Structure formats: structure tokens, C-alpha cells
Image (cartoon, rainbow, N blue to C red):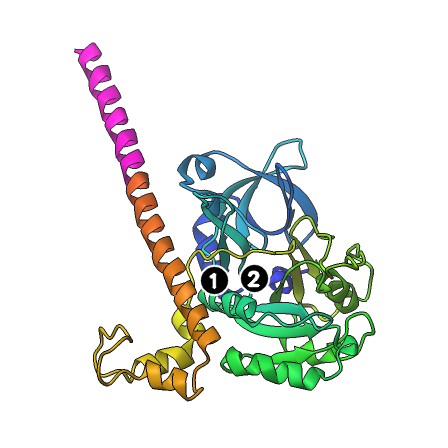
Amino acid sequence: MELADLGWNDHFAAAYAPHAAAGLQPARVICELKHAYALHTGEDEQLGECRGRLLYDATSRAALPAIGDWVVVRSRPGETKLDIVAVLPRTTKFSRRAAGEHGHEQVVAANIDTVFLVAALDVPLNLRRFERFLAVTRESGAQPVIVLNKADLHSDPTAAAAELESIAAGVPVVTLSAEAGTGCRKLAPWLKRGQTVALLGPSGVGKSTLVNRLMRDEVQDIQEVRAGDRKGRHTTTRRELFVTPSGAMLIDTPGLRELQLWAAGVADAFADVEAVLARCRFTNCSHETEPGCALRPALADGTLSPERWQSYLKLRIEQQAMARRLEARRERTEKIVWRKVSKALRAQRHFEERQE
């Protein structure tokens, strides 16, 4: 296998060039383990660990390798394990806010070309969930594609696809049945050699079944969803990259029941709402009693649904709150850096005084 088969391109080659003279080599992260990473060098698969300055300089977990990352590695004499010494700049990055009140940025997958947003048609569609996923996917830089699985269990999958298209703003919507094997060929345009695709969606929608279908092999364990609520059982417990027979790479992810925003392209995901707001007479319109407000008539005549407007407001509020958290985190990071610098200067002065 060549590096190009793993997604290597001119962007990564240029970033790697300074490391080549030092005898280091590139590798791609294909699986995140508990205390290490599975890497593919183009020749074989090996384990790797972060070492040295990479760990010291990392200001957050997001600075360390994630599934799909290209890294620079160094061999250990007499060992098969590799040292990861650098992470090459990412072309795309799919991030979310980790769980918890003070959640930090968590990179779900990096250097992905396409994101398959997978939902199942054996339960009612959650349009609000798709609005959230679309906003985050657009921010990542990857191309979103909505995949409606279990089409054989829906009375009118075409109508369901049309319902998604009404909020998808031109995003492709594909209906298929991974279990039955029907419709999977529709995904061929995004499954070309060297392309990387991430599958995202809640548990139970059939992501692992779809991976097995596209791989033409049982590479992922699957389980039945619970009969009571049709929710999945988190079959996939780690992120892993697979190379398909077509040459594309698939990244399967653990089910995301709750996706908290990190940084999201809300404006792109809600272009219809933004277009309505742009027609307001005043740029600071509160949409209450101002003359020339375009929102109130749009809600009254059904041009814009109240649910769509409320979803937009909710994501905007989350985005603003996250922006405040990011600014506070940046200020804390700067203070930490200056403390380290001050400590180093004091140590240097102390050393110089002892030499006098």
C-alpha cells in the first residue's frame, strides 16, 4: 500500500518536508487505543506513543493525535513501537465539546473528506438533530452527506428524504438499507481511492452494518437495537479507520447521543433563516415590535417554521456561550505560558548569579 492510498497528498508532503531530513517518517492514525495509537506507515501497521516535545507543548487534548491524523514518527532501536513526535496540520477537523461543565475540545476525526450523517427510518426523523450535525459538519470543512438507513422499514422513504432536503440546504440525501444491501451503490461518488469518510450518528442507526456492507466483510460487530425504544447499544466503542475495496477509507465512531457544539457554522446550516433576517429594516432588529421586521411575517405566513427558528436561536445561544468559554480558555492558556516563561527567566537569573 502506498501513502496516497491512505490519503497522503501535497498538503501533507509539504508539511512533512522539514522532518524528512531528520530521518523521520510519516504515518496515519488508524485507531485510537487507551494509551497508544495504531498507525499505518504505508508498509505495515505499528503501535505508536506520543513522546517528548509533542506532549510538553500540547495545550489541550485537541493538539494530540486523533483518528485520521497524519503524524511524524521515529523508530525505537530494537523495538517495534514508534514514537510520535509531531502532528501534521489538519485539512479538516470534526470537533465536539467533550462532556462536562468545563468540557474541552474533543477531535472526533481529522482529515476527513466526507461525513456520512446516518439516521434510521424505523423511527421518526429528528430534524433538530440533523440541524445540529449539519452545523458542526460544515464547520469541520468536510462535505456532509445525509444517509437514511433502513429504508426497507419505512412506508415512503422518498417522502422522508424530501423532509430532510427541506432543511439540508443542498446537502445530498441518500436512502438505502445496509441490512438488505439495497441502495449502497448510491454512495460510490464519495468512496473513491484515497478519500476519507467518517460515519456519524446515534447508536442503533446501523453505522457498523453499513461499514460491513461497504467493506464486504464482517469487520464490525453488530447488535440488535432495544425493542422498547429502538435505541442502540453502542456496538462500536472506539474510533477506527478501515480501507474499503474501492480504496476509500471509512472511520466508524462510537454513537453520539448528544453532540455539544464546539465551533459551528450555524449561518451556513441555517442559510434560509439568515436570508429572512437579512431583510429586516434594522440590523439590530429584536424581532419584537420594530417596523420593517421580516421575521414576524415569515413566521406568520409559514415561510419559516417556528421550530426551525427556535432551533436556530438555540444553536446561536450555544455558539455564543462556547465563544465565551474559548476566550476564557485562551486567557488561561496565555497565563500558563507566561508563568512558565517567568519561571524560566527566574531560574536563568538565579543560575547567572551563582556563576558570578
Instruction: Please state if 296 lies on the left or on the right of 134 as rendered.
Output: left
Q: Is residue 342 visible?
A: yes
Question: Magenta segment, principal secondary structure?
Answer: helix
Give percent across and percent down for residue 23.
52, 44
Magenta stretch: give its range: 334-356
Amino acid on which disc 1 is placed: Thr
Q: Position of residue 118 (x, y in %)?
A: 65, 68
Image quadrant occupied by the C terminus = top left
Whether 349 is among the magenta residues is: yes
Q: Nearer the viewer, residue 150 or 170?
A: 150
Q: Residues within 10 Å of mark 2 (few under 14, many from 20)?
A: some
User: Considering depth in this image, is 300 or 35 the residue closer to the camera?
Assistant: 300
Where residue 304 sits, quadrant-wise, is bottom left
Placement of 144 over or under 93, stated as above or below: below
Q: Is residue 211 above or below residue 184?
A: above
Amino acid type assigned to the residue bearing label 2 in the image: Trp
Please provide percent x and percent y for residue 124: 66, 72
Structural crowding at the residue carrying mark 1, measured as other residues with C-alpha within 10 Å and reported as few (<14), some (14–19) or many (≥20)? some
Is 254 magenta? The answer is no
In this rendering, position of residue 239 left or right of residue 316: right
Residue 279, quarter of the rendered image: bottom left
Q: Residue at x 49, y 65 (%)?
A: 10
**Disc with the residue nearer the chain's start (1 vs 2):** 2
Where residue 334 appears, as percent x and y from the top left, is 28, 40
* Residue 21 appears anywhere in the view: no
Residue at which label 1 appears: 91
Q: Quadrant of the N terminus?
A: bottom right
Disc sitting over residue 8 in the figure? 2
Residue 347 position (above or below residue 7):
above
* Separation of residues labelled 1 and 2 (CA atoms): 11 Å
SS at circle 2: loop
Is label 1 in contact with label 2 (beta carbons under 8 Å)? no
